[in-house]
Image (cartoon, grey):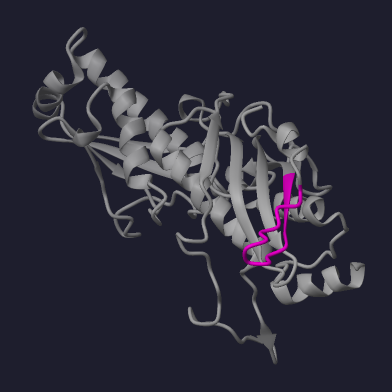
Amino acid sequence: KRSRYQERRKLDRVIDIPETGARIRRGVGLSYFFHGAGFTGNGEAYLKGKVALELVPGGQVLIKTASTDIDQGTVTIFPQIAGDTLGISPQKIIMVPPDTSQVPDSGPTVASRTTMVVGKVVMEAAREIKEKIDAFKPGQPFSQSTDAYLKEVGPLRVDATFQSPPDIEWNADTYQGDAYPCYGWAADMVEVEVDLDTAEVRITEFVTAHDAGKVIHPVLAEGQVEGGSLQALAWACMEEVVLKNGRMWNDRMTNYIIPTSLDAPEMDVDLVEAPYEYGPFGAKGIGEMPMDGGVPAVFAAIEHALGIPLPDVCPLMPERLIQVIEESS
């Protein structure tokens, strides 16, 4: 309903521009998709991702984790999870740089696992610290008890390890069972305009709905969906790896074309919350899912615009699409 997909399907597909002679066809496409979060099968149980939280003077807490921030917001998300669990401001949480000599092995920053898997371990470690402080000074706010604890009891560090959900079963020999602990679900709606003479495809509208479990940080989650979706849209029409003699030929920014802000359509992102019991506060992983739906939605929109089937070739560059148009006519 939010995308007005059915309404858009009924619009006139022909939007020629007599003043310029342009012959434009409009179409809309829809895709439904899902993506598993965390490592496949018993991967997380094998990794046993670890996190350490340490109490320091001034009511501050150090988070020690190998999860790296590659601009997806880990240094914001983890302090928020720990702060909410401890009942203190995230400003009081310090992320220790992920130097392998200083932090435990939390596993790699991949597989849509950072928030859902490692974030849950952060939450459990924070919960244990809070329980110790609460037992030391019952009824006292956390921030008022920490320095006294360090002085009277001594250092406080909690090491936590990922615990597999009890209802997940996987047979590594037969490769059968629960492939992932949970899945995120999503849908993309794309509207395109196709120039019949140049075969250029312009994406004019993009609406997406993503099941994020529980959204920890709405701005970061929306940015993750927008960035991944833009890459997916570009993969459909623009980004192409050209190989020559077994090596990537177009390995420079001058000849590997990626979208700019001028290529990006207006994006309407709807974050749907369906909490996952074993994620931090119900969060799921959404790092990779936005890449899954762009190509089928764009191809469906182009097929609707032109009224012809498309080849299974991606990306559908103008030089390829013009051949399809010419052959169909």
Q: Residue at x 74, y 66 (%)?
A: 314
Q: Quadrant of the N terminus?
A: top right
Q: Residue at x 86, y 54 (%)?
A: 307
Side (left or right) of 130 relative to 317: left
Q: Quadrant of the C terminus?
A: bottom right
Residue pushed farthest top? 139
Q: Residue 67: x and y, percent?
A: 41, 51
Side (left or right) of 117 relative to 236: left
Question: Which one is nearer the viewer's eye here, 189 or 209?
Answer: 189
Residue pushed farthest front? 19
Tell me where residue 98 sits by quadrant.
Answer: bottom left
Q: Residue 302: x and y, percent?
A: 76, 56
Q: Residue 158: x and y, percent?
A: 32, 34
Residue pushed farthest bottom? 245
Q: Residue at x 46, y 25 (%)?
A: 281
Question: Which one is nearer the viewer's eye here, 62 or 267?
Answer: 267
Side (left or right) of 310 relative to 121: right
- Note whether 50 is above or below 142 in the view shown: below
Instruction: Let me know if residue 210 is in the magenta part.
Output: no
Question: Which one is nearer the viewer's eye here, 147 or 110?
Answer: 110
Q: Residue at x 38, y 46 (%)?
A: 74
Q: Which residues are magenta?
A: 13-29
Q: Residue 168: x and y, percent?
A: 69, 32
